[in-house]
Amino acid sequence: MLIETPLSAIESRLRYLLPAELYADMWVDPSVEMLVAVHKHLRTLRHILQDYTSPRIAGNKPKPGDVRTAWQHGSIMFTDLVGFTRLMEANTARGREGAADILKQLTKYFSSMSAVISKSGGDLIEFTGDALLVVFPKNERDDDTLRAVRAGLRMQRAMQEFAEIETPSGEKHVNLKMRIGIHSGRFLTADIGTPRRMEHVLLGGDVHQAKLTESAGVNERVNLSQQAYERVAGQFNFEKGKPGYYLVNDDLTESALGEYEITPLGRRMASTALMTLDEDEVLAQIAKLLNAIEPLASYIPAPILSLLVESAANRKIPADFPHPTVMFVNFIGLPEAADHALPGEEDKLAQAFSRAFSLINAIVESRGGVLKKVTYHLSGSDIVIYFGVPTAHTNDELRAASAAVAIRKLIMNFEAPVIGGTQPNVHCLIGIHAGPAFVAEIGDPRGRREYNVLGDTVNTTARLMSSAEKNQIVISKHIHQAIVEKYECKPLGAKSFKGKSAPMQLYELEPPKRSIS
């Protein structure tokens, strides 16, 4: 009979949080010195995961698998970076060296923006490609909209540093610009998922309005929705933008704008340094670290978590130019229902969203893909999925097609709960494309950051999704060529997209010709 030791009691918890070599060595040599090495790794991993999750998660960790909701009032900021595609194109041919140069510029950019956001009292919720989602929570001390606008102006001023980035040839310069939209209102926050894969989402019409405000904005300006404008109309000068929107005039003096609202205290964590070599105490400290790590780890997709675990000792993931297959799923119906929820129905809505998210994640993971995040669109929620990063397969396009068909079937048959007396009309729009991309750990190297995929391939996939009709899967010519032997693909003709010199030939993905193993 196997006698359980203190180490074997926590073995299953360590299995996916230790590098393969360290995990094997731990069992070959279960000495105190080896346990100290395990503790050191977990301490490093805790710091990494703390930086990989938003302050809302890191500061108030739910039990993995527990669905929780809360209404929040505040101002939502969306940003969009313009010019990154040109920067990528100028460096792609240089391989890893070019990727390192791009990462250097992005690190400066994101570090600068993160510092402004933090000192302005904002919470950096997520990176979506080169875009940012920031929430300025309402509090009793000051006005959240005022903080958001001042932060936006500071961020636009900081962009002057990126006005002329010299290309490797030295013959041209890349000009990075940013568009900022701010909307104030109420939104429902929800933590959804399973114990091994959680996600933090924002639901409701005010989230969509914030995204619309950014889309209706102008490069190098801060754009406000009507609601945000009414809150600060007497404190800034404005000019009218598109109907219903207002552009802030940056005519404040440097001293007036330069005084930050708060002094960040940093994301401090209790010390976990070992003060003893007593085996029982070391094991107790390891268990304590696991209790802190597991809630954070549940918010990281499994393949990315594995990458972080294996690279923790180096604390760096090299930037690269892979050719991933990217899928965007616009999940429509449930996110909008938040505004119609009667008191007490928020949890019912979140449970339904959690079920859909968990099933979609299972579909993606079973085919070797990564459900990176649930983000925000002009309607519904966008689910961003990658095949080919961080792990590539020879048939990633087929894997993506199989996942898309299964996801569409799941959503079409999804039984949505009655919310506010009405059953939401749940449906989806799906786009799939493949091509070159920039992959790196982006953000502040000593603070908030994420593993992310950026570039024109990602942007184009989002546009394919937006061009789809209800429950339609739109794919590019590249995807069609890779899957045509196993899938029916209906030609949709050529369509012009922003940023493309020529129209793209599109196809509709239909069910497979035969069973695919």
Image (spheres, rainbow, N blue to C red):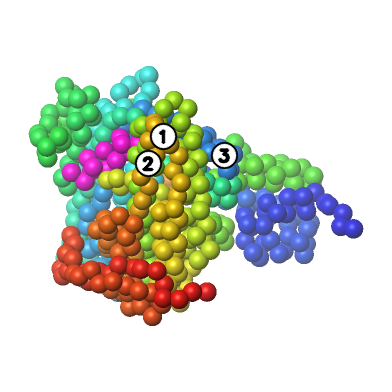
Q: Earlier in the sequence, mark 3 or mark 1?
A: 3
Q: Is residue 300 magenta?
A: no
Q: Is residue 47 left or right of residue 181?
A: right
Name the amino acid type tagged 2.
Pro
Question: Foreground residue, 260 or 306?
Answer: 306
Q: Earlier in the sequence, mark 2 or mark 1?
A: 1
Mark 1, Cα crowd under 10 Å, few <14 / some 14-19 / many 20+, is some
Name the amino acid type tagged 3.
Asp
Is the residue under label 3 in contact with that under label 2 (CB below 8 Å)?
no
Kindly identify which numbered label has been placed on residue 66. Answer: 3
Evaluate whether residue 446 shows in this view: no
User: Disc 1 designates what residue?
Assistant: 419
Q: Helix, strand or loop at disc 1?
A: loop
Residue 207 drawn at (x, y percent):
32, 38
Residue 214 drawn at (x, y percent):
23, 43
User: Disc 2 designates what residue?
Assistant: 424
Task: State which mark lies toward you, 3 or 1.
Answer: 1
Q: Is residue 212 magenta?
A: yes
Question: Foreground residue, 363 or 446?
Answer: 363
Q: Which residue corresponds to the image point at 20% horizontal and 51% vertical from the top-left?
A: 177
Kindly identify which numbered label has been placed on residue 448. Answer: none
Is the residue under label 1 in contact with that under label 3 (CB below 8 Å)?
no
Question: Foreground residue, 277 or 400?
Answer: 400
Relative to 421, residue 436 above or below: below
